[in-house]
Image: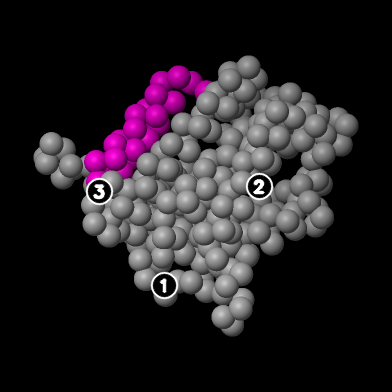
Amino acid sequence: MDAIKQYMQPKWWLIVVGSIFTIMGLMTYMNGEGSAKTAWGDTVTDNDVFYEKAWSANVIWVAIIALASGFLIEGRALSIVAMGVSGGYIVSFVLIYLAGADLGYGYLEPGNAAPGIIAAIGLFLSGYLHLEEGE
Amino acid sequence: MDAIKQYMQPKWWLIVIGALGFITGVGNYATAEDSAEIGWGDDYTANDVFYEKAWGLSQLPISIAALVSGLLLTGRARSIMAMTISGGFWSSMVVLYPAGTDAGYGFMAIDMLVVITVIMGGLFTSGYLHLEDEE
């Protein structure tokens, strides 16, 4: 268990997830049309492109929270933030999946969705394993 | 200054903004067709409705982070989260606003954005004023 805890440090999970989300968010924003085509195929509208950019704005927001908490917060507070952010992400993903699976939205296919979900579960576990640490 | 600090408690700013974010996010999910109509007028598509649902739900990780920070964190960690969540909002608006106005998206009305920006300014200020508080 100690070996698992050693590799499941919420600080580093938050920093890595925050960094990946920053890159993903900026790439989606800069390439909104390409993201929309990945999601819906070749027939995309201007609205689809806008929404992909808008969604990336929220991803950047989450990334900033993850990075700042990873760098600046310690102990039990850090674990709570890790669990809060990742728990919220998992709940939102499940509901988005229920809303969009029938439409054939490309980012909800297992291959595209798995990395985000695995990262969120890892982040949640890292927080849970270190929840009893002091400040 | 002490009187201002007394009313600018990050705990309550985080809880209220987290609760509002949660309610508006779930509300957007529940009334996505209405939101799409406000966003684009009568000729909205099924994709627009899906994106409105997803966008509402993508607020959940941020709202839950605000709520748990307000309810469970103390001192400097809570102040950092207050400043980070509000700072993240402004960063996301920097990328969202140009995309939204270019697309003619109905929710980009300047008066509404000013209100939200001022509220987030309150959250940031509350964190800043209590940044040196003990854990």
Q: In whole angstroms, how far apart are the C-alphas of marks 2 and 3?
A: 31 Å
The residue shown at (29%, 40%) is B128
Secondary structure category for the residue under label 3: loop
Q: Nearer the viewer, mark 2 or mark 3?
A: 3
Image location of residue B62, percent across then percent down:
49, 48
The residue shown at (79%, 40%) is A39
- Same chain for mark 2 and mark 3? The answer is no
Q: Which chain does the numbered disc 1 sit on?
A: A
The residue shown at (39%, 29%) is B117
The image shows a total of numbered marks equal to 3
Image location of residue A52, percent across then percent down:
69, 34
What amino acid is found at the position of numbered circle 3 in the picture?
A: Glu
| In this view, A134 is above or below A60 | below
Q: In whole angstroms, how far apart are the C-alphas of marks 1 and 3?
A: 22 Å
Image location of residue A120, percent across then percent down:
62, 59
**Would residue A32 be counted in the magenta stretch?**
no
| In this view, A133 is above or below B76 | below
The earlier-in-sequence mark between 1 and 2 is: 2
Categorize mark 1 by other alpha carbons within 10 Å: few (<14), some (14-19), many (20+). few
> Where does the magenta region start and end?
B108-130
Q: How would you classify the magenta stretch by its main secondary structure?
A: helix
Residue at image mark 3: B132
Secondary structure category for the residue under label 2: helix
- Label ID, residue A20: 2
- Label ID, residue A133: 1
- Label ID, residue B60: none
Q: Which chain does the numbered disc 2 sit on?
A: A
Left/right placement of residue A20 relative to residue A66 reads right
